[in-house]
Image (tube, rainbow, N blue to C red):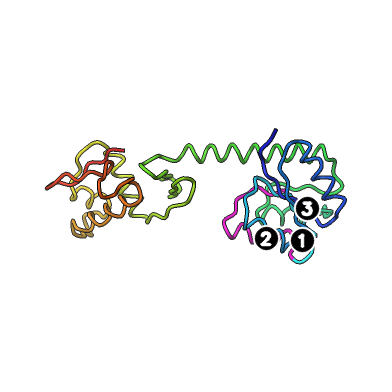
Amino acid sequence: MSNKHILIVEDEPDMQLGIKDNLEFEGYSVDTADDGDMALKKILGGHFDLILLDVMIPKVSGFDVCKQVRHKGVETPIIFLTAKGEEIDKVIGLESGGDDYMTKPFSLRELMARIKAVLRRSSDANKEDHQNFVEIGKLEVNFENYLAQSNGSPVKLTAKEFDILRYLLEHKNSTISRDSILDAIWGYDYQPTARTVDNFILKLRQKIETDPNHPEILITVHGIGYRFIP
């Protein structure tokens, strides 16, 4: 049985019920919305693994729903369902942030196959993204995309904090002087004081250490600098 949660946004009752029954028969958890306003509230207020989104719905069109949730940072896969079959509509749907497009009438067998394919691609992408994260204390850090999270929740790091963490990781288990950090991160032309490094280290400890007052990862080496033990 699947534990995937799918939202159906469809204003035709028979169509909505038919898709819902088939999805539930396949083991999916299903929620529904009848118009664009309700869809936006549910998408922005909950978690779904996939959204089936009709284009011609009341209040807010499917295209606009997609644009708005993508603008808010929602990356949930979206399959558009619509009676529109013109090529330009498919282009608009995909450019607005959709992942696939099905033109009515369609067979439920094909819809189920498309759903499984999109969910599989999404799962593979999430696994790949997770593999790019490095665990540093309480944080998981993706240096390639400048992302950080803790227990699945985003954590804000400045660009300099990312750069310092990367440099420390590259020199893990070694004693690193403040001057080395200054030269590597700020360069020779612009030289802040050693105190600047200390301030950044304090901020990083708040984000990576279980007990920042008794650090076990970012250790002070008195009179020299720091040792990073991930």
Mark 2 vs mark 3, CA separation in Å: 26 Å
Quarter that holds the N terminus: top right
Q: Which residues are magenta?
A: 60-81
Disc 1 target residue: 35
The one nearer the camera, 32 or 170, is 32
Give residue 38's position: percent from left, percent from top: 72, 61
Q: Secondary structure at mark 1?
A: loop
Relative placement, left or right, of 206 versus 122 is left
Q: Is residue 37 above or below residue 170?
A: below
* Residue sticking out furthest to the left: 223
Q: Which disc number belongs to residue 87?
A: 3
* Residue sticking out furthest to the bottom: 59
Tell me the kind of residue under disc 1.
Asp
Relative placement, left or right, of 95 versus 177 is right
Give residue 47's position: percent from left, percent from top: 62, 50
Tell me the kind of residue under disc 2.
Leu
Q: Secondary structure at mark 2?
A: helix
Disc 2 target residue: 40
Mark 3 vs mark 1, CA separation in Å: 24 Å
Q: Is residue 63 magenta?
A: yes
Relative placement, left or right, of 192 versus 108 is left
Residue located at (75% from left, 48% from top): 101
Judge the density around disc 1: few (<14), some (14-19), many (≥20) Cα neighbours within 10 Å.
Answer: many
